[in-house]
Amino acid sequence: MGFTWFISKRIAFSKGNKKNLSQIIIRIGQTAVAIGIIVSVITLAIGLGSKKAIKQKMADFNGHITIRSYDSNNSFNSSRLNKKSVQLNHIKENGEVSKIQEYATKSGVIRTQTSFAGVILKGVSSDFDRDRFEKFMVKGSIPQYSVNEISNEVIMSEKIAKELNLDINSSFIMFFVKENQDPVYRRFILKGLFRTDIKQIDDVFLIGDIQHIQKLNKWNRGDIGGYDIYIKDIEDLDSVFNNIEEFVGYNNFAEKATTTFSQINDWIQIFDTNILIILTIMMVVVVINIIMVLLILIIERTNSIGMLKTLGASNRKIRKIFINYTLFIMLPGLIIGNVIAIVLLYIQKYFEIIKLNPENYYVSTVPVYINFFHILIISGSALVISGLVLLIPSYLISKITPIKAIKFQ
């Protein structure tokens, strides 16, 4: 064990330290470190958790990647996809792809005895990922769709149902308008209600059998409006998208969920800036408090510094002793801060105590993403940055001469 390391530990863990006048300053410094770590860890976990949760919600409804015809543009009415040109086998071979399902959309108007609403019917088939959608359901059940029999059962957002005074097993008529033709109507039965907390979805969408859209558009049974592609990890979306894009075929295009809901995506990108600002502020607070503690320790231990110099210790070694000593003081704050932050995050994760307004935040509770590697990075960065910054005030030690130091009271 090195000389500087040995002396630092003896001073840091000496029982006599508890009687020093500087103990209050040390406790304040440790408290500041703990608070800085708590705020930093919670900020990062909530920021990343919110980004991940909102992006995942967008993708779970609409697919992480969507393939559709150029003729669709941004229309709510799907144009027929050129299925033959889509190299679906190559897309399925991608190890990051977990699910592919067919869909088509058609806009229309629901009319009841008391109200009406413009909506979009998203038609799905037997390959609809019911398990993935189950977390959005608030009432009723998801219909089972089959290619052999057309179903009149649908699910719609809870918001639309409330506006139209509809409930489970209610029947209603939906009108579809074609150019230069009389309106066409279909009667549906409401079997379930869902809520995604994303306004752009909950305001307009209901889900039903794709065969209704095929008949309305006079398509063949196998014709579809596009593919919803789901991947294993949304954080890999950009790299997977680049690989899939080359297989979409002629007159088709692929679009990421983050592009489809670009306004929401732009909003959550602000999280990165906010996280960086808060982490920077907290790191500055920690460093300032640690510098304050070091300066107090140098003043308090002036006699010890003079004695060490008299015994032949160099300024460099004495500086290392005090830097190590100060970092030892940080450790309780780091440990306590991390423990408190992790406990609070797990409480929120499993009990969802803190609620949010989904109309403003797209989620109903504060989401958290706990990554212990990120926690280690924050703690390690605090130690390294503090150690480097402490080099500057530690140079005060070189100004202390043995004679003046020993006389210092």
Image (cartoon, grey):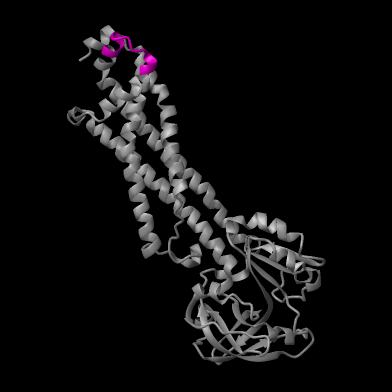
Residue at 26% in and 7% down: 403
Residue 129 within the segment the image draws in magenta: no
Q: Is residue 23 visible?
A: yes
Q: Is residue 82 visible?
A: no
- Find the residue positioned furthest to the top: 403
x and y percentages locating residue 64 in the rendered image? 63, 64
Residue 57 as seen in the image, left or right of residue 383: right
Residue 217 as seen in the image, left or right of residue 171: right
Q: Is 276 located above or below residue 181 in the figure?
A: above
Residue 311 within the segment the image draws in magenta: yes
Q: Quadrant of the N terminus?
A: top left
x and y percentages locating residue 58 in the rendered image? 58, 66
- Find the residue positioned furthest to the front: 1
x and y percentages locating residue 188 in the rendered image? 60, 90
Q: Is 360 located above or below residue 189 in the figure?
A: above
Q: Which stretch appears magenta?
A: 307-317
Q: Is 366 located above or below residue 318 in the figure?
A: below
Q: Looking at the image, how many numbered discs can be counted on the residues?
A: 0
Residue 405 as seen in the image, left or right of residue 203: left
Q: Quadrant of the C terminus?
A: top left
Quadrant of residue 60 in the image?
A: bottom right
Quadrant of residue 93 in the image?
A: bottom right
x and y percentages locating residue 298 in the rendered image? 30, 21
Q: Nearer the viewer, residue 297 or 160?
A: 297
Residue at 31% in and 29% down: 293
Quadrant of residue 112 in the image?
A: bottom right
Residue at 71% in and 90% down: 184
Residue at 59% in and 80% down: 206
Main SS of the magenta part reads helix
